[in-house]
Image (cartoon, coloured by chain):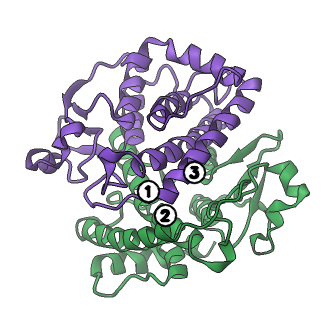
Chain colours: A purple, B green
Amino acid sequence: MKLYDFAMAPNARRVRMFAAEKGIELETVSIDLSKREQMNDGYRAINPRLAVPALVLDDGTLITESVAICRYLDALAPEPALFGTDAKDQAIVEMWHRRVELEGMQAVADGVRNSVEFFAGRGLPGAVDFPQIPALAERGKQRVDLFFAMLNERLADSEYIAGDNFTIADIAALIGCDFAKVIKKRISEEQSHLHRWYAAVRARPSASA
Amino acid sequence: MKLYDFAMAPNARRVRMFAAEKGIELETVSIDLSKREQMNDGYRAINPRLAVPALVLDDGTLITESVAICRYLDALAPEPALFGTDAKDQAIVEMWHRRVELEGMQAVADGVRNSVEFFAGRGLPGAVDFPQIPALAERGKQRVDLFFAMLNERLADSEYIAGDNFTIADIAALIGCDFAKVIKKRISEEQSHLHRWYAAVRARPSASA
């Protein structure tokens, strides 16, 4: 199988970090989004959604959506259990992962895509162009502040976001926190619980994958 | 366990329909969002996120996020396999479910929350108020048209959205299509594949749950 990837793309990083935690080495092909290579005919034939990451299996099946790719990798290598252990734990991991996606990653993406010059006319990823919406960028930035405050409160009581174990919710949150730097949102040292968590997760080898 | 629910809330309907497909009968408590009962102190103590659905387990554990609740129910009753069967099928279901959520349910929600009078000052669900963003409502409506066209194309080749079997992706898509009526977006009969699928899925007993 082959992963279509780009170093700076947050969702591609989510897959790389997940694979690294599982000890899976993936053959990767870089699609340079900074040069809009995802719009080329060559890539269009591979993934008509014109986004990365995309995983192509040996039988030719295309899997898009970073979490769908992570679920496939999870089935190949069940340990460590990054989607949770038993039924209750899996539900709690899903809950926190989705909160991180909806309150964090989505907020950061709204902020970045709707304010950064590079994304002018490209307010959403994918095959169709949408204009930036400045009010949505502002809302995104406000929500990033709320997200950091929410995480700081949660991490006062919990070693990792979904409980005692490192999970995909931590991967998503790390990537959200790092991506937020693009719109000048950074964790403050006063958010001591979040700061403690960030330092620990950022120090994992997988964070550099 | 007890499900906090509201008949008209799309994400609550997603859980009810999923449970009905599994043959699980849930004890439900209705929180009347039309009267903003989710803001009351009583419910605030149960779910500080002030949204439905929310599942409270017998040990007191709170599970929010509709898909997290569905995953818990799936573990209780694995058949029928609404999240897919083997590793590849599960990844394909996750991919289509996420496409339906991101391209469909999210687009409809953007359209509804940012244009309907009832949601004035409540552009997002949850504990914090955000003003409506008219440009986001317009983008949402445009994206609903693209979503219907995408589904129609997909369903020309596939009985259900993720393949030969009915899955959670179909549940999410049905609910997205029905919720879109609030902003006057309806499947046209000319979209014959989507129309065929909609009639079949709408006729399932679970669609009335």
**On the rendered structure, is B36 left or right of A168?**
right
Please determine if labels 3 and 2 lie on a single subunit: yes
Kindly identify which chain the residue marked by label 1 belongs to.
Answer: B
Precedes in sequence: disc 3 or disc 2: 3
Precedes in sequence: disc 1 or disc 3: 3
Query: Dot 1 lies on which element?
Result: helix
From the image, tell me which residue sits under label 1.
B102
Instruction: Please identify the quarter of the rendering in which residue A27 is found.
Output: top left
Residue B102 location in percent, x, y? 44, 56
From the image, tell me which residue sits under label 3.
B67
Mark 1 residue type: Leu
Residue contact at pointers 2 and 1, CB within 8 angstroms? yes
For the residues marked 1 and 3, what is the alpha-carbon distance in whole angstroms? 14 Å
Q: Which mark is residue B144?
A: none
**Dot 3: within a 10 Å radius of its alpha carbon, few (fewer than 14), some, or many (20 or more) residues?**
many
Please report the residue visible at 27 percent of the width from the left and 61 percent of the height from the top: A128
Instruction: Please identify the quarter of the rendering in which residue A28 is found.
Output: top left
**Dot 2: within a 10 Å radius of its alpha carbon, few (fewer than 14), some, or many (20 or more) residues?**
many
From the image, tell me which residue sits under label 2.
B105
* Position of A186 relative to B55 (above/below): above
**Dot 1: within a 10 Å radius of its alpha carbon, few (fewer than 14), some, or many (20 or more) residues?**
few
Query: Dot 3 lies on which element?
Result: helix
Please report the residue visible at 65 percent of the width from the left and 33 percent of the height from the top: A89
